[in-house]
Amino acid sequence: MTEKELIVFDLDGTLTESKQNLAVAMAALLTRLLEKKPIAIIGGGKFERFRTQFLDKLNAPEQLLENLFLLPTDGAAFYRFNQSGWELVYQENLSAEEKREIIVAFEKTFQELDYSHPVEVYGELIEDRGAQITFSALGQEAPLELKGKWQKENYTLQLKLVETLRVNLPGFTVRAAGLTSIDVTRLGIDKAYGLRQMEKYLGIPLGDMLFVGDAIFPGGNDYAVVSTGVEYLTVSGPTETQTVIKKLLE
């Protein structure tokens, strides 16, 4: 594990709790790891979310940021740091027509399943992330404890929404994400795609990468990486991820 050239971390549920800020202890460990080897972070949020949730709390020296690579919207975009700041390497943006098609399919799915939104929601239910459209059952800014409660009570419903939406959107990739969300990107755009793009742009073979995530199981939003053959570790949350980083630092 310690011989891998690139360590790739999922964000929500792995480095942080769902949409929560990076903890001070985690930031310190990641900074130490950046001194030793490159790190990539991949997650469902857009770059602005990565900045507020992760980068602003990491507080690493600029010279170390050249060792850090960010893949928002599940690998549909790729950023790297240089002297001018964060540079967008690529972004697989959805067209206006594709976005309309996705929104219509969501509404059709809700009608087919007789699904009603909660009376109280927190922020947008459906967010346009440029390269990705994301539905969050309680809204994009729902409190963590409410999201955890919703998933426990509605996990089967979340999967049913995904299954029905896939039928209604055969030309797109649809996946359950986080505790309450469903992500839609262009067909084939997922975390496996992100890993292959890093292999292309960084010149690091998949066999020299290690992926760390909390949802590497069938139906989980990290499971796509298994298809690449990359070595991976499944963690239960940020506490276990800290243990993994400490081992990498030994």
Image (cartoon, rainbow, N blue to C red):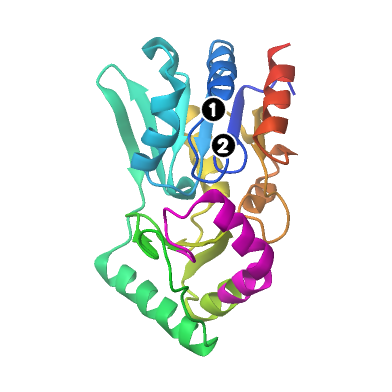
Magenta stretch encompasses residue 185: no
Query: Where 40 sits versus 109, above or below?
Result: above
- Residue 102 pos. (x, y %): 38, 72
Q: Which residue is mark 1?
A: 23
| Residue 162, position as x, y percentages in the image | 57, 71
Residue shown at 46% from the left, 75% from the top: 117
Report which quarter residue 60 is drawn in. top left
Mark earlier in primary sequence (1, 2): 2
Q: Position of residue 36 (x, y in %)?
A: 59, 11
The range drawn in magenta is 136-161
What amino acid does circle 2 point to? Thr
Distance (Cα) linking label 1 and label 2? 7 Å
User: Cβ–Cβ below 8 Å for labels 1 and 2?
Assistant: yes
Residue at the image point whose x is 61% and y is 43% from the top: 13
Q: Amino acid at mark 1?
A: Ala
Q: Secondary structure at mark 2?
A: loop
The residue that label 2 is drawn on is 16
Other-residue count near label 2 (Cα within 10 Å), few / some / many at <14 / 14–19 / ≥20: many
Locate the N terminus and report the quarter of the image it occupies.
top right
